[in-house]
Amino acid sequence: MHKLTPEQLDCIHDIRRRSKNRIAAQRCRKRKLDCIQNLESEIEKLQNEKENLLKERNHILSTLGETKQNLTGLCQQVCKEAALSHEQIQILAKYSSSDCPLSFLFPERERTTASDSELAVPAGVELADGVSGVTSAKEQSSCYQCVKSVCDVTYDPAQELHPVSVRTVDKTSLVEPCGQSGGITDFCQQMTDKCTTDE
C-alpha cells in the first residue's frame, strides 16, 4: 500500500473540506431561495386579499350611503304623509341615534335648540279684559303636571291619523282660573275636559 506523505494528506483533507463546504453552501442557498419564494407568494396572496377587502369595503360604504339616503327619503315621505308637526319631528329626532336620518329633517340650529328646550306653561297670559294674569313657577309646574298626566292617559295614537274635532273653548275660561288664588284645580279640570272631549 502506497503511503502518503503528510503534505499530501493535508491536501486531500483540504479538498474534501472544501467540497463539503461547497455542498453545504449550495444547500443553504437553495433553502434561502425556497424561503424567499414562499415569502413572495405569501406577500402576493396577502396583497390580493387586501385588494379584495378594500373593494368590499368600498362597496359596503357605497351601499351604506345609498341605504341612508333611501331611509332618509322614506322617513321624509312618511312624515309628510302622516302630517307630523315640527314638534313631533323634533321629539323623534331627539330620541334617535346620531346616524338616524330624522336628524336631517330640520336644520342643525333648530336641533340644538330643541334638545335644550323644555315644555312649560307661559308665565303670563292676557285676559279678555286686557289684564295680565301672572302665575308663579310652582303653580305652572303643578298645572302642567296635572294636564300632562291626564293627556298621556287619554292619548290615542289613532288620533294622529284621524284627528277628532275638539270643541272650541273660550280663551278667558282657560286663563282666568290660573290668575286667581286657589283656581289651579279648576284650571286643571278644564284642561282635563279639553283633553278627554268626545268626537
Image (cartoon, helix red, strand yellow):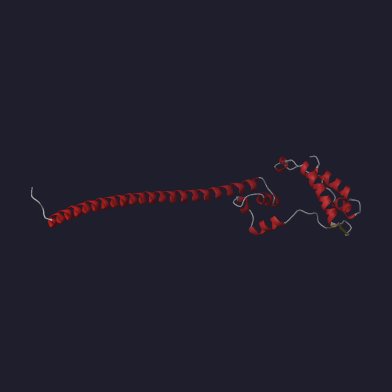
x then y, percent, for residue 28: 27, 52
Q: Which residue is pictured at 28% across the width and 52% down the height?
A: 33
Question: Hey, which residue is sitting farthest left in the picture?
Answer: 2
User: In front here: 15 or 52?
Assistant: 15
Q: Is residue 199 left or right of residue 70?
A: right
Say which residue appears at 49% left-offset and 48% top-offset: 60
x 84%, y 50%: residue: 143
Q: Quadrant of the C terminus?
A: top right
User: Going by the image, does 36 lie left or right of 135?
Assistant: left
Q: What count of labels does the image hold?
A: 0
Q: Depth check: 196 or 30 in front?
A: 30
Most distant residue in the right direction: 181
Percent x, y of residue 123: 82, 58
Image location (x, y in percent) of residue 137: 83, 56
Name the foreground residue: 37 vs 117.
37
Q: How far across and down, in percent of the image, does residue 87 sit? A: 70, 52
Comparing 54 with 2, the one in front is 2
